Image: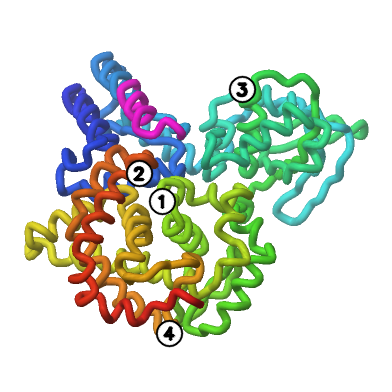
Amino acid sequence: MAPGNKASDLNTAAAWVFARDIESVPTQIRDSVQELQEAILNGDINSIYFWYVHNLNEKNNKDIQEELNTVQVAAQNLVNTFSPDTDIKIIALEVGNATIEKWYNSSNKRITIEDTMRVYTNKEGFEIAEDKWKACVTAVSGMWLRELSLKYKEDEIFSGNPRNFLGAGKRKNKINLGIMATVEDKPKNFWAYNNGITALVNDYTLSEEKDLIIKGITIINGAQTTGAVASVEKLVDDFWVPIRFIVCNDTKVIEEIINNNNKQNEILPSDLRSNDKQQERLRREFKKYPQLYYSGGRRDDKKPKNKEILDPYMVAQTVMAYHGDCVKAYNGKKAIWDGDKDYNFIFSDQLKVEHIIFVYSLSRAIDEYKIMLKNKREMRTDNENEQFDYLSKRGSKMLLIYTIAESMESVLQKKILAPWSIAFKDNNDFDVLVEKWKSVIKSFMSFNKSLLPALEGGLKNKEQVKQSAGQLVSMVNAIQEMLQIQLQDFIKAVDTDM
């Protein structure tokens, strides 16, 4: 029998994973915990599993189950406190021989639901048959799909699908929220709005009256549609969902069907903006600098070689941070592209490619400065350790960009009448620009302690940001003359009148 005290150790792990004070996390796993925390806050994670893994048979040990229940409840409370805006599901499992065997068997048997059932269709459709498969293409009742989803477990109905339903949170799964909204508000338009579902079945029978009977089912594409329909509390009106039922007995072809049905690219907010006039203008203007590549949100299979690639999301984030809102820049990576107000604030006629290069090179310089400190490891001085600790905190880069922007007049000792026009005089060598920024970063990082209060619990409090940045700006003002000497190469390289 597996020891119960090992299961209780998961509570300690949960406390570390969602710790607000990253310094309390053991150094061996601190970087990994930070990456996980950032993924949570960015809305990239929907479920977190805590596994108690052992090589014994599960014995329905009540002590272990109670420990796992405690872990699940405690971890759920911790993650809800850590990131209240995300919708993350915590699951604690005992994984022993029986569970591993079950998973292995289900991985080799794509269809786990073997019941025979009648499908409620619109009695329209057609059949396509090839040597190794046949398919019935039709439309099914939304209510039938909902009943199917509620009757069986996710692992059963999606046994042949690489993903289960990912939920309908406010951030990551807006598409699923949109599906639910269509079901509730415009059910009659569902067929036209939705791409439909692909299901693998053991067999089907289609009568002359178009009655459809299926034997077994797994939904191999359309888990989000199925889950969203099931998540609607009550269906007032029925609606039609496009679907195709495929029968295939060739294992290799089945795997190919599943793989090819799940290779669609996610629609990103930047995709929907890629043909915007401002993105077209910026792509055109960036051609002046052949060593740089900016896609403007347009995705294709071309991978430019020997070019500095400017990520559109990082461009938006850094420009947003530089021009006054590092909190939104850090927390709203995709939201900036999603909402018209923020998008139009950044991507307007006043945004020039030279200014993007100016701000983006600052972002890259901060990244390289952090890597330099990381690589020094035990050779870091006490002051460098403090700098590295600052740069390891969530939101530190966006806060530093904002603070440097707020201090730019002090750095240049010149009134900046057009902040959106500031740029380097010569933009032909991006690496040189990055190096010029590093002298500025080094000077500012000497005062990093004044910024720490703004990073407590993540970069969220705009008032604290202003207060902390204001203190650092005051320190910079106090040493203007010294900075003039230290940063003379940077100052000479900057043009405020482009």
Disc marking residue 459: 2
104, 193: nearer the viewer: 193
- Which residue is rendered at x = 46% and y = 42% of the image? 43
Residue 235 occupies which quadrant of the picture? top right
Percent coordinates x, y for residue 27 in the rendering: 15, 47
Q: Are marks 2 and 1 in contact (CB under 8 Å)?
A: yes
Check disc 4: other Cα within 10 Å, few if <14, some if 14-19, many if 20+. few
> Along the polypeptide, which appears first: circle 3 or circle 1?
3
Disc marking residue 426: 4
**Alpha carbons under labels 3 and 1: distance apart:** 43 Å
| Amino acid type indicated by mark 2 | Leu
Q: Which residues are magenta?
A: 73-85
Between label 3 and label 4, give the one nearer the viewer.
Answer: 4
Q: Are marks 3 and 4 in contact (CB under 8 Å)?
A: no
Task: Specify the principal SS of the magenta part.
Answer: helix
| Amino acid type indicated by mark 1 | Cys
153 up-or-down from 423: above or below: above
Disc marking residue 326: 1
